[in-house]
Amino acid sequence: MKGVRKTFVSGWLYRIKKQALRGVDLSVPEGVLWGILGPNGAGKTTLLSILVNLLKPEEGLVRVLGDDIRARSMAILQRINFSSGHANFLWSLSVRENLEYFAMLYGLSGTRRKRKIEELLDLFELREFAGVRFDELSTGTKQKLSLAKSLVNEPVLLFLDEPTVGLDPDVARRVRESIQRIHREKGVTILMSTHNMKEAEVLCEKIAFLKEGIIKAFGSPRDLKEELRLGDAITIFFQGSISTPSLEHLQGVYDFQVSNSSCRILVDDHRKRLPQILDFFMSKKVLITDLRIREADLEEVFIALAR
Amino acid sequence: MTRRNFFTVLEILFWPVVGFLSVGLLAEFASLQPDMKAFILVGVVSMGALQVCQLDVSYALLYDVWSKSLKHGFIAPVGIRHMLLGSLIVGMIRGAVVFFILMGASLWLFDFNFMIAGPGPICLFIFGLFLNAAVVGMLVCILVLLFGNRAEVAAWSLVSLMLLVCGIYYPVTILPGWVIATAKLIPLTYFLEYIRRFYGFEPSFSLVLAKGYVMVFAYLLLEILLMKAALGRAKRKGILLKLSE
């Protein structure tokens, strides 16, 4: 997508305007699992909805699988799929019937449809719920059904909109495992939105950080940390005294704070920098009594970017 | 499955049968002449079948709206025309079942033989009736796409308005001039006029069958264009997403 803008208007005479996307450029290569991370209201769902032709942008080019989504929507929709958190399907149909319904919408018939549904029931451990009506399912099982439905047409590209929102940690973990399995075993390209930093860090190879309708940062979790100079924190407890200015000259040091008996040093990568820092302390003839390392996580990136 | 089928059958048959029995018994109580009884029984049977078919067409969107699963339907590679056509076929089958059940019940309970008109005219009438139902059902879908949940009331109220205007229980000629003018814009008026001629009531208008079909196809064509426009607007304004939340 290139230069995509979307504004929602509401209220009397459409006076209230909310810019959901303000010129988004994003290109996703084949075979990746990328994430769109951002706070609530950042425009993540809007962005994914435009990509699956549920929303029309005012401006910008949207190409999915190489074609304009608006011009060739039917052909594209046949090869992509979508799953969202807070899954909703026809409430009076069972798990199996819902899968059958969507399999039919995607043109699967006869034994091919039957085989696909059996495969999905097994893949997502839904067999014991096959005959249970949708409105009687737990939130986690509904979410699994949503993921199962999203694979009914064997998509080459899958959009996941906050797939673990509202799930308890154990179910969320299993859903994340399912997503990884889909990506790894079936080779599906996945673009997922989330505001869960851990999830993005664990699952996504690259992350676009979206805020107020603009991609503020893009890269792998490590790239983002480096870009924002959110390094790893090394805290060294020592006996003796050190001259602080010399710490500044060490390579990879972003920041440091020294007190009487401890020194907290922020570095780009503790694995690379720890030996030279230890050498530095030893050269100053101080006794290191303790050492703690804390890796910067995406949460800090999120907070820094959302600020 | 069995429980759901039971409720589905009940839903399809309940109101048409209740309406039919109420009106039929009222006609018996009022000791109406056979032709008068025929007039209102034709109306009530038609109304029952029309409503069942129309609701099925409206359900093409409404079930998804009620389940908040609308977006999944629109993400699938099927156009709204496919959904509507599929719903119309189901509606026609269900509507025909209701029509023939009530037709049989008319003969059995109230001694009125619908088949006097002959199979040809009845088929032409039923088909026109179902196309009229499609017009109403599609209008409901268009309104839902334009106005969201607020418009779902149209699924039941539009047909009730027709009941007042189109001459279901009385000839349109007894209505005030401006209501007759409105009735003339509704194909159902012409289809009812057409079928009642076989039970002794001369049509109030000329070329009723032709007018009914021309009008119903014109409306369907217009609605296809409106549906496309409404869907485009829904995608611009995010209504599909709102209806899925």
Image (spheres, helix red, strand yellow):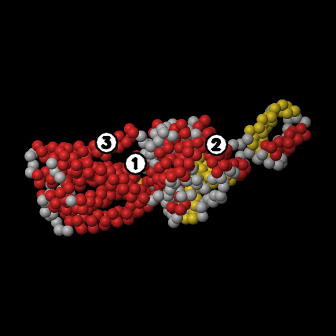
Q: CA distance from mark 1 to mark 3?
A: 17 Å
Q: How packed is label 1: few (under 14 Cα within 10 Å), some, or many (20 or more)?
A: some
Tag 3 and tag 2, C-beta contact below 8 Å? no
Q: Is residue B166 above or below residue A131?
A: below
Question: Where residue A97 sits: x, y (%)?
Answer: 47, 45
Question: What residue is pinned by disc 3?
Answer: B10
Mark 3 vs mark 2: give the one in front: 3
Q: Is residue A79 above or below residue A178?
A: below
Chain of residue at mark 3:
B
Chain of residue at mark 1:
B
Say if labels 1 and 3 share a chain. Answer: yes
Question: Where residue A236 sits: x, y (%)?
Answer: 80, 36
- Residue located 35% across and 62% down the image: B223
Q: CA distance from mark 1 to mark 2?
A: 32 Å
- Of residues A20 and A127, the one nearer the viewer is A127
Question: Where residue A106 sits: x, y (%)?
Answer: 51, 55
- Residue located 15% across and 43% down the image: B25
Tell me the element at label 2.
helix
Question: Where residue B82 sits: x, y (%)?
Answer: 42, 59
- Residue located 48% across and 38% down the image: A132
- Of residues B112 and A179, the one nearer the viewer is B112
Residue B148 shows in this picture: no
Tell me the element at label 3.
helix
Question: What residue is pinned by disc 1?
Answer: B63
